[in-house]
Structures are given as structure tokens and as C-alpha cells.
Image: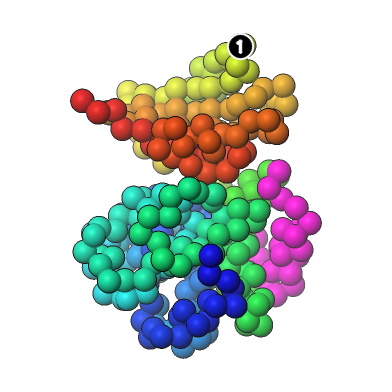
Amino acid sequence: MTSIANFYKVISSYEEIAIVVHKNPDGDAVGSSLALKDLLKYFGKKVRIYSSGELPEMFMILRDGYMNLKNYSIFEKLIFIVDCADFSLTGLNKDDIKNKIIFSVDHHNRTKIKNISKYLIYSEKSSTSEIIYNIFKYFNVKIESKTADYLLLGIYSDTGGMLHSNVNIGTLEVVSNLLKYGGKLKLAMSCLKERKKFKRVKLWGYAIERLKFNQKYGILYSVISNTELEKYGCSKEDVSGLVNFINSDKNINIFAVFICQNNEIKGSMRTENKLIDVGKISEIFGGGGHKKAAGFMYKIED
Ligand SMILES: [Mn+2]
């Protein structure tokens, strides 16, 4: 692993730097990429953020900061990838990364670090945004209020509004400091509120109604198919967050949501049971994540 101390050494040889967020980024990917851009700009770098596809609707007000990889190609020699455990989700192809340095900043545990030459991975952190905060602190860079807003968006998004068990005293300290630096929760709140659009609430209602409990293994799960997504005018991104919502009853071992679309199964799993590692289970299906929260995208071969 690259140390935070070496972070500056790595970036010092590059004038132009790219940041890439994965497909359908969540609040942490968005928040950490925007904050990292501010940090690199502070060090005098020219920075562009690329995304694989359009940003989800809930981040509409931030869309201008992103360049769609469909329309632009990456020429920068140093590419940061934030909050992305699965390289294939970046949308980067072989030519994009040929002779480039790929630098991953992340809090997802992983076994594969294919294509990545530098990395700062702290799986004990609540979010990638918290790691970016630490880099600001290490180099004593002032966090402007706008940057604090981005970091708060990331932390709030990954902790379900400070309700998940990945929140610890360190996370609270970071949030408290960000508020001190003039950060507001307004951005985080308005993005997260967007999720409660009528069509999405209807789809969630359907999925909750259809929850099934497997007594033998203690798994609570719901399966959503293409037909339902179409019926409610939703895409699979609209389901994101549902698994956190149903994660409640401590007598249940695993909470899971599966989306079956065409020849793909997207699974999201959560657990609060210390003896279970949903990250390992996800790995079986080519995914990854943490002990408590993980997901996969499984392609059914013909
Ligand atoms: Mn994250």
C-alpha cells in the first residue's frame, strides 16, 4: 500500500490528473471524487473527473463536474479511482489505462487489485470520503466549506445518515470538524431526499411486500425482476438503499435484495451477525465488499 505520506510524491510528477468514478456512483463516490479534485487543485494540478455513464438523477445538481467517458477519452497519465472495489465498473478499457498509473483510494476490502499500481485502502473507515478527509489533514490543507459539503455527502451516504454500524468515534469527529469548517448537511440531504421519488417508493413498497424469510438460514430477501422495474418505470439504480432499509431485525442473519434483469443477477447483502461475512459470500459470485455489507453482479452465461 502507498502511504498517505507518499501521496504527494506520487502526484508531484504529474500536472494533469484524472479521477474516475464507477458506474452509477453513490454519494460517497460522488463526494469523495469532488473533494479529491479540490485537494489536487490545491496542489496546483489540472483535474478532470470522468464517469462511466451519466450521473444518477439524485446528483443532478453536481452533474456538470463530470465528463462522461462515452464522450471523452482519458489522456491523463495518472488516474485516481475512488470508492470502487470492482475495476470493471470504472468503464475504463485497455487503451485508457495503457502505460498509466492507476491509484485507488477506497474503503472496500478486496482480494483482486488487478490493474492498480498504487492504493490507499482503509477498510475500517466509514467511507472513501473519510479517507480523503485524512489526506487533507495529513498535508494540513484547509478544507473549504464547499469541500466539507462534498465530504459530508459521502459520509452521510455511506453511513445511512450516521445510522449504520460503520460509524465510530472517528467518524463523528470528522463530521464535527467538517461542520466546523462551514460544511452544511443541505447537499447530502437534498441528494438523499431525491431517492424518495414516488415511483421509487412504489417499487420499494412492492419489494417490501414480497419479502421472504428463509427460516433455516435466517435470510430475509426480496427478488425484483425486469417486469417490476418496467412496471414502476424504475431502473436497478432505484433499488439502491433498499437493503439498508430492511436491515433491522437482529434475529435475522442476512438481509438481501436481488435484481434479476436479462441475464444478470445483482445482489446486495447486509449482516449484523459477527459470525457471517457477506463480503466472502459475494466473492463467490464475483463481487466484493465488507464483512457487513457487500454486493455482486452475476452474469448468467448462455
Ligand atoms: Mn463508499
Residue positioned 28% across, 65% down in the render? 97
Q: Is residue 170 magenta?
A: yes
The residue positioned 75% from the left and 60% from the top of the image is: 170
Query: Residue 77: x and y, percent?
Result: 32, 76
Q: Disc 1 residue type?
A: Lys
Q: Which residues are magenta?
A: 165-186
Does any portion of residue 72 appear in the rendered image? no
- Disc 1 on helix, strand or loop? loop
**Does residue 167 show up magenta in the picture?**
yes
Q: Residue furthest top?
A: 216
Whole-percent x, y for residue 230 in the image: 32, 29
10 Å neighbourhood of mark 1: few (<14), some, or many (≥20)?
few
The residue closer to the viewer here, 41 or 301, is 301
- Mark 1 — residue? 216
Residue drawn at x 49%, y 68% as measured from the top left: 34
Left or right of 272, for residue 28: left
Residue 16's x, y, as percent?
A: 36, 81
Ligand 1 within 8 Å of disc 1? The answer is no
**Residue, far bottom:** 44
Query: Is 18 left or right of 159, judged from the image as shown?
Result: left
207 is higher (above) or lower (below) than 60:
above
How many discs appear?
1
Tell which residue pokes out farthest to the right in this image. Answer: 169
